[in-house]
Image: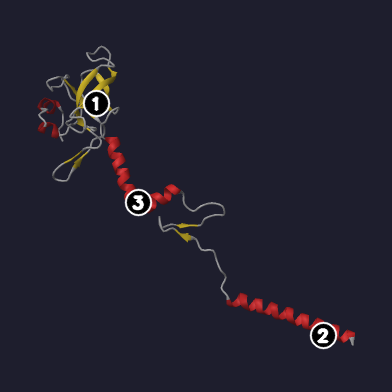
Amino acid sequence: MASSLALRAGASTLSLSQTSCSSRTAQRQNVAPVRATPLMSQFSGSSVAPSFGQSSFTRNEVMADCNAKKMGIEKAAMGRTQMMIQVQSYVTVADNSGAKQLMCIRVLGGSNQRYAGIGDVIVAVVKDAMPNMALKKSEVVRAVIVRTRHGVRRESGMRIRFDDNAAVIINAEGNPRGTRVFGPVARELREKNYLKIVSLAPEVL
């Protein structure tokens, strides 16, 4: 009697295990395997698969992508500020007065005048000069801006930009101290009555 009960218990256990195995097999056959799909970046449009313990995006990337328009405006303003002439900006001398490089120490035109564009006058100190010339290093001079990387926007909508920031050293009357002007200059100088500089320039744009 006891042996028959043990055989029945073993048979029932075997049937239960077979039933559970068959149900698992059916579930595996009916259910499609779940695959890890990469997260689609809503910021940059590229698929990103983050690894364990690492974030998908850095703070800078998220800010730059989420606020693309805002960041673009800020970057443009930053670029404009760096390309404009301000205090401690270095400019190339575009004449043969003897100075080669100037550093702006003041922008003339009022207390609120922070930046200098084409045709504006600055007070600068000579940082580099040619030997045996009238102008020496550390001498304070006045100069008019003739070229800027930022350029100038005209009424037609065209913007004229140059490869460098350059100035021509002038005297108290506004005339150039040198006898030659190197490189092109903007025609806006004619509107500000720097006719001598315009006449000496090889090209007026």
Q: Position of residue 43 (x, y in %)?
A: 40, 56
Q: Position of residue 180 (x, y in %)?
A: 17, 22
Q: Which residue is mark 1?
A: 106
Q: Is residue 29 left or right of residue 49?
A: right
For the N terminus, the image quarter is bottom right
Residue at 28 percent across and 35 percent down: it is 83
Q: Give the farthest residue toward the front.
A: 111
Amino acid type assigned to the residue bearing label 2 in the image: Arg
Q: Is residue 177 left or right of residue 3?
A: left
Image disc number at residue 174: none
Image disc number at residue 68: 3
Image marks 2 and 3: residues in contact by CB distance under 8 Å = no
Q: Give the farthest residue toward the bottom.
A: 1
Mark in the foreground, 3 or 1: 1
Please rate how many residues cluster around mark 1, counting C-alpha atoms within 10 Å: few if below 14, some from 14 to 19, many from 20. many
Q: Give the farthest residue toward the top.
A: 132
Q: Secondary structure at mark 1?
A: strand
Q: Secondary structure at mark 3?
A: helix
Image marks 1 and 2: residues in contact by CB distance under 8 Å = no
Residue at 73 percent across and 78 percent down: it is 17
Q: Is residue 69 left or right of residue 63?
A: left
Q: Secondary structure at mark 2?
A: helix
Quadrant for residue 117, please give it.
top left
Amino acid type assigned to the residue bearing label 3 in the image: Ala
Q: Which residue is mark 2?
A: 8
Residue at 57 percent across and 75 percent down: it is 31
Q: Is residue 139 above or below residue 32?
A: above
Q: Is residue 171 above or below residue 189?
A: above
Mark in the foreground, 1 or 2: 1
Quadrant for residue 182, please give it.
top left
Distance from label 1 to label 2 (Cα)? 105 Å
